[in-house]
Image (spheres, rainbow, N blue to C red):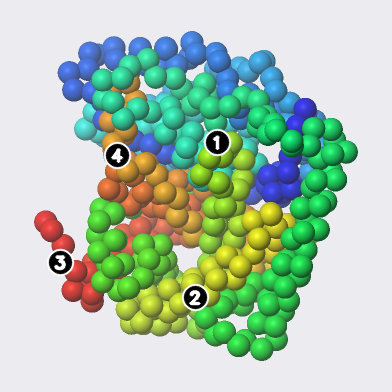
Amino acid sequence: MKTLNPLDATWLYVDSARTPMHVANLSIYSMPENAPDNWFSDIVANLRQTRHFAAPFNLKLTSPRLKSVFPTWSETTDIDIDYHFRHSALPKPGGERELGVLISRLHSHPMDFTRPLWECHLIEGLENNRFALYVKVHHSLVDGVGGMRMLTKMLSFDPAARDLPPPWSVGTGRDGPRPRREGAPSTPWEKLRAGLQRQGESLPELSRAFGDLARQAGTHQNPDWVLPFEGPKSILNGKVSAQRRFATQHYELDRVKKVAKAAGVTVNDVFLGLSAAALRRYLGELDQLPAKSLTAGLPVSVRPADDVHSGNAISFIISSLHTELADPIERLKAIHDSTQAAKVHLQSLPKAGINNYTMLYMSPYVLQLLTGLGGVTRPMFNLTISNVPGPDRPLYFNGARLEQMYPVSLLSDGQALNITSVSYAGQFNIGFTGCRDILPSMQRLAVYTGEALEELEMETKVKRVA
């Protein structure tokens, strides 16, 4: 039995029927050239026969009724593969719209807490001889970087590789607990004493960090540093319904990099700039654009390079999207200044205190959700925007080339939109997850980010190669 750390447990505490806390990855593949007619059916049969389950796919809640009080994981071998692995087919013509409708519906379904918290859907019938894989996992088990590492492990850089395992057999690549280092504490009392010592050592830095936050709140000495609850109330920040919309966009990563270089900002700044431009236009058309700038919560990975586990290892910063600015270059540079100010503050913290800082920093957001005030009071930030790095070379699944991958994220009361990107093999792929009853025609957001990139290319005089 394993007790969840506070950050992982938080996703269980705030889970509800309207706001399920699962995340997913949608990957699209091209069938191998000259694949026989039975290629896909054989893949389905082989996957269904694979009954080895690696962590975190072999974990279930010890007591689902206590998931919001004292959640713990237990390993299990009693897993119904026919429930967790599902084979679907799209109606013809099997285009992007049909796929988006199916993913929106699948992502709206809450998970069964009496079972391991994952599902895997293999979807055939996409036009141009393609198929898709949609893998859904509860956020208490995985974060974006951990999930990307698991997906990469089930694939191969070799197009000739065959007999590759399904996601549930790969997991994190490590079923048991982390190996004990020589001299590391072994008994519960030793671990407790060591943990308290680490927290005690980081207490002065944490006190200083929150002192800096308090001074900034009182003086606004750094105009670029955005604090919690400084964003306006908007259409994005009401109560959400249980149904989701999902839209996608993708373009060449090199285009984003060239704009970033020309403007003297980062790739993530450009992504925020595209999102800001799209939101400014979309909300303006709905006559719902606040006069004050929207703000975005940005998850920041704090996972060590050698950490192969999938649990959450993230902190948060808040950035202004400067949606009040009409000029795209002025907006982009202002976004850069805002993200830099937040990063400077986060980077000043000791690594040992990051988890405690994150829990304390995000506690108002969690309290809003636990008390039912999410979507009623002013939001801590207006929406979440996340950027997850992916593999930089093409990957294959039993000879089928991975063409694109898209993140499908979660929503909560007060957060009706999530925009997450993932890079892959020279692509920049964006998934838009939104509340169906709040955001109409959400595909327009995806279209507007593409047009915003073209505008930035013109403004920065970046030449696009046809």
Q: Residues within 10 Å of mark 2 (few under 14, many from 20)?
A: many
Q: Amino acid at mark 3?
A: Lys
- Residue at far left of view: 466
Query: Does 435 appear above or below 293?
Result: above
Q: Closer to the N terminus: mark 3 or mark 1? A: 1
Quarter where residue 399 is shown: top left
Q: Amino acid at mark 4?
A: Arg
Q: Amino acid at mark 2?
A: Ser
* The label number, if any, that marks residue 308 in the structure image: 1
Q: Residue at x 21, y 32 (%)?
A: 128
Q: In x, y percent, where is residue 29?
A: 31, 32
* The label number, if any, that marks residue 463 in the structure image: 3
Q: Closer to the N terminus: mark 2 or mark 4? A: 2
**In the rendered picture of this protein, how many numbered marks are placed on residues?**
4
Q: Which residue is mark 4?
A: 393
From mark 3 to mark 1, how far is it between C-alphas?
A: 40 Å
* The label number, if any, that marks residue 86 in the structure image: none
Q: Secondary structure at mark 1?
A: loop
Q: Residue at x 78, y 55 (%)?
A: 199
Q: Select label 1 or label 4 by which is in front.
A: 1
From mark 2 to mark 4, how far is it between C-alphas?
A: 32 Å
From mark 2 to mark 3, how far is it between C-alphas?
A: 28 Å
User: Residue 277 versus residue 466: which sits nearer the camera?
Assistant: 466
From mark 1 to mark 4, how far is it between C-alphas?
A: 20 Å
* The label number, if any, that marks residue 338 in the structure image: 2
Q: Closer to the N terminus: mark 1 or mark 4? A: 1
Query: Does 76 appear above or below 150?
Result: above
Q: Amino acid at mark 1?
A: Val
